Amino acid sequence: MSSIRRVLLTCLCGLLSVAAMTQSHAGTLLIIGDIEVRKTKADGRSAWDPRGGLPDLRVSVERISEPAGERHITAARKNQLKVDFNRTAIEVDAGDELEIQVYDDDVGGDDEVGKIRHKVTQQDLKKGEIQLSFDQVIQLNLRLK
């Protein structure tokens, strides 16, 4: 094999490797749907904000399984216990592990409402939804399309 062919073959193999590593994660769209949270922080007494204020809810969904790093954070919704975000977040496949965090968005530092890890299953994809309840989150509905 000539040296030019070897160089070309090496370049082609390198390009294919880079393309495979940077290929987007194909799958089902995960949509952050509606959420409802408890009236108080985890201690059962403290309001989310001063003077009895309601939380400014924000949701983060991140794929932590390979290929990791895809993340979506919603805009905060002010002074609400129930919100329908109806926001397309990321693409997922069965077996993907997600980390979902819900925060009360505050200027002086965010309060964690809840945090959970969930592994997407074939059953989730077939149902077209994931319903979660964790920490101060009464219910979070994620739709899969």
Image (cartoon, rainbow, N blue to C red):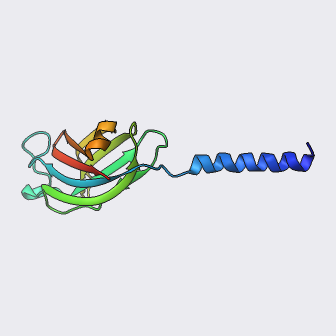
Decide: is 62 above or below 56: above
Give residue 51's position: percent from left, percent from top: 8, 58
State the residue at coordinates (24%, 57%): 106
Front in this rendered view, residue 62 or 124: 124
State the residue at coordinates (65%, 49%): 18
Give residue 92's position: percent from left, percent from top: 39, 46
State the residue at coordinates (35%, 55%): 89
Q: Residue furthest right?
A: 2
Left/right of residue 26 with respect to residue 128 in the rendered view: right
Decide: is 115 above or below 54: above
Give residue 137's position: percent from left, percent from top: 17, 44
Give residue 88's position: percent from left, percent from top: 33, 58
Q: Residue furthest front?
A: 126
State the residue at coordinates (18%, 39%): 135
Decide: is 129 above or below 89: above
Left/right of residue 19 with respect to residue 130 in the rendered view: right
Left/right of residue 3 with respect to residue 19 in the rendered view: right
Quadrant (top left, top right, bottom left, bottom right) of the N terminus? top right
Looking at the rendered structure, the number of numbered marks drawn on it comes to: 0
Quadrant for residue 10, please give it: top right
Q: Is residue 128 visible?
A: yes
Q: Is residue 119 visible?
A: no
Left/right of residue 143 with respect to residue 135 in the rendered view: right
